[in-house]
Structure formats: structure tokens, C-alpha cells
Image (tube, helix red, strand yellow):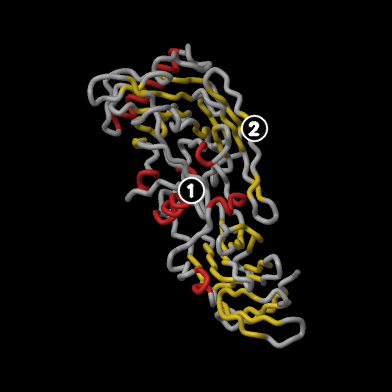
Amino acid sequence: MTMNDSDVREILRRATDDLVAPAGLLGAVRRGGRRRVVRRRAVLAAVCVAVVALPVAGGVRLAGNAGETQVAAPLFDEPTRGDLAADEGYLRQVRTTWDRHLKQIGEPTSGPPHVVWAGTTPAGPAAYVADGTLRPTTVGFVEPTADGPRVGTLTQVGDSGTDGLEQATLLGPQRDVLLVLDFGQAVEFSPELRFLPDGKVERTFTPVAFRDGAAVLSVPPQRTKLTVALAKTPVERRNALHISNTSLVLFPDGKDRPAAPLFRHTLPGTEQVWGSDPAAEDVSAPTEAIADYIDPVGAHTHNGSPRLSVYGVTPDGRRLLVESIQYDDHPSCVIALLAGKNSPFEAVASMTTDWLAPLPVRLRLPDDQGIVVAAEGSALSYRIGDGQWQDAGRDAALLPASATDVRVTDANGTATSVPVGA
């Protein structure tokens, strides 16, 4: 599964308040074996359709020659840690692999790099290297493979503080080993993402127990999607930790993923209360209003399911907003939100949906404010009890709370009657 520039820009808009996606962002993210320039601290959390975590600022700056950045402790001033720290044969192999890789990408070094950590894992021996002979300083993991050590993603260190450096990597052919470095801060770990029946996200975090500079964790295989998540304490979006080789999972075939279809509908009477057409302005739910439905620190892609936005007004004059969120291969969650004239949006109803069903969306609003229904490309009508069918327009509608049945007529003229339920 991959994603395109519009996906990335959507996540940047939702997941960061002050970050703008630069041109060519997708290519920069996907270059797993090339250098990544780390310039600022920015954490991307999964929001609506797809997320790819990006590298963030790091490094420790010491005074040096004018115009130069020198990176020291803990990357250089500390001795090598890990249970292979004294294994000169392995350390020599790591340095040789590192030098050969840098030459292959046109960045030859002028001296031996420093191995920050070297240790055994269930996937084989691994290491983390910091190379101060390059400008800017370059860091990265050396991972085990069937053909011997391999250099993973490289990151150029450009700003102050190790906070934000890629601190973890997935190892093994199944990517079922997670190596997490100890940068001196408490870290928590979640192996899986689960969903409640109403589509809310559920994660359980436990503290990471470091030993001799790192922690080695067994995780579910991460070949087709990322279920694991890491964060500094307290667990929240701005404290998310990036796993260096997530692009291998998010972009397995190196191709852009087609953008998910956008279904946006403005119901009659909306503009009088909203003041303008919210669909034309691409209005979306505030992140804090749908926080229960957002994975706070995970990284995800999408399966091409539609992205739905419905704008309307309830009988009592509140603004109505309906949005969908979808992660990886999980079903979409559709959320209804209401906001008074001077009040923020609040999620009031939600459901998981099957977009292939005749009536994918049917959400009953509280306080007898109606029933939201949606079926893209279909004509909608409703009835109350055994009464006459009444036209409700096309694609999406807000029905009276007393409606009992919806008739959906698709583009082929096939009509299906669906009870709306209590």
C-alpha cells in the first residue's frame, strides 16, 4: 500500500498545526536508503486516510569552527553499548558495510564512524552508527539480512537535541523484531491497534525497559501494515517516535497509491447557518473533536475506501458535520458531529460501515434531530411506518427522526428498502 502527495498533505494539515508539506515530499519520504535531512521537529499522527511518519530534528550541537555543526554526546562521547560492544569482528564488519554503502551513494567518509550501539536480536546482530566525518553528521541503523549487514535509512543531523532522531527500526524478514534505542527518555510501546464496535481507537501502552542502551521487542509481523506504535511519556501526538524503515511497509512496491475518492455533500439550508458552503472551503472536523477515533501515534495507509464529508443543519439550528476515517485494511468509521452557534464541534454518533452495502451510512442523531443517511450515486426516499414514500434527494440526506425505512435506488435503477433502526 502506498500513498500520494494529496494523502500526505491531508495528514500534514490534520496532524500538525504548523507544518506544511513541501513540494516533492513523497519522493523524500520514500528514499529509504538515501539521506534524509532532519531540519525540524514534526510528528505526523494517523488521522483520516493514511499516515507516514517523517524524520524529525535531532543531534547535539557543540561549539566548533564557524559555520560547522559538530555532534557529540551521546552519539560520540559515550563508548559503544550493547552486548556486541566488545566484538571487534562484528564492529569491523559494521564499519566496512557503512563505508561501502556511503561510497555507493556518492558520500565517501574520511574516517571510521562511531558505532553507538551493537547487539544481538532474534533477527540477528544489529547496530546504530553515527558518522561525524560527514557534514552534516549522518546516523543510521545497520540491519541484519540473509546476505549480511545492510545499512538502512540514513538521516542527516542538523539541529539541536537528540529529541526526534529516528530511534527505532523493524528487523527480520517478517519485521517482527523492534529495536528501540535508549536516548535517555522514558518510552512507551503499543504492539497492536484495536477498534471498539463504534469505531473508536483502542491502544494499550506499556513502558519500554531499556538495557545497555536499547530494548529488543517481539512484535506482530509488520509486513503489510504497521500496528506498532512508540511514544515518549506522556503518550500524545507530539511525543510520537518514528520507526526508521516504515516506508518499506507503507510503500512496498514503490508506486504511488491512487487517491481515495472524495464524496462531499452540502445538504439544503446549510449555507444559511454556516455562512458559506463548507464543502467549497474543505471544512473538516477539528482533531480534538474526533480524538477518540484517531490513532494518537501510529502510522497508517488506506485501502482506497471513500472519504466522506456531509455538511448540514439540524432542525434545532446546529451545524452538522459527518466525516469518515479509515486505517489500513480496517473498515471505515463514519462520525457525526454537531456544533451550536458559539460551541465547538462534538462527536455525537459513529458507526463502522461497508461501502458496498445499499445504504452504507445511517446515523441517528441525539435529541430527535434526525437520521443521517448516505449512499453515493443513489436516489433516496423515506417513509414513516406504512406511509407514503417521500423524496429525500440523492447521495446524502438528513431524514426526520420518525423515519422508519429508506429506499435506495442505485444508478442501475435497482431499489432496496432498508430499515433505519432505532
For image coordinates 47% across by 20% down, the residue present is: 117
Name the element at disc 1. helix
Residue 103 visible in this rendered orientation of the protein: yes
Q: Which mark is residue 15?
A: 1
Q: Which mark is residue 170?
A: none
Can you give x and y, in whole percent of width and height, for residue 403 in the image? 71, 77
On screen, residue 292 above or below 412: above
Q: Quadrant of residue 345?
A: bottom right
* Quadrant into which the C terminus falls: bottom right
Q: Is residue 5 left or right of residue 310?
A: left
For image coordinates 55% across by 40% down, the residue present is: 236
Mark 2 vs mark 1: give the one in front: 1
Residue 26 visible in this rendered orientation of the protein: no
User: What amino acid is found at the position of numbered circle 2 in the picture?
Assistant: Thr
Can you give x and y, in whole percent of width and height, for residue 319 in the image? 57, 66
User: What amino acid is found at the position of numbered circle 1 in the picture?
Assistant: Ala
Can you give x and y, in whole percent of width and height, for residue 54 in the image? 43, 41
| For marks 2 and 1 on the same chain, the one whose residue lies earlier in the sequence | 1
Cα–Cα span, label 2 and label 1: 24 Å
The residue pinned by badge 2 equals: 206
For image coordinates 48% across by 48% down, the residue present is: 15
On screen, residue 79 above or below 399: above
In depth, the one of 319 and 194 nearer the eye is 319
**Which residue of the protein is positioned furthest toward the left in this rendering?**
66
Q: How many marks?
A: 2
Can you give x and y, in whole percent of width and height, for residue 288 in the image? 56, 50
Q: Quadrant of residue 364?
A: bottom right
Mark 1, Cα crowd under 10 Å, few <14 / some 14-19 / many 20+, is many
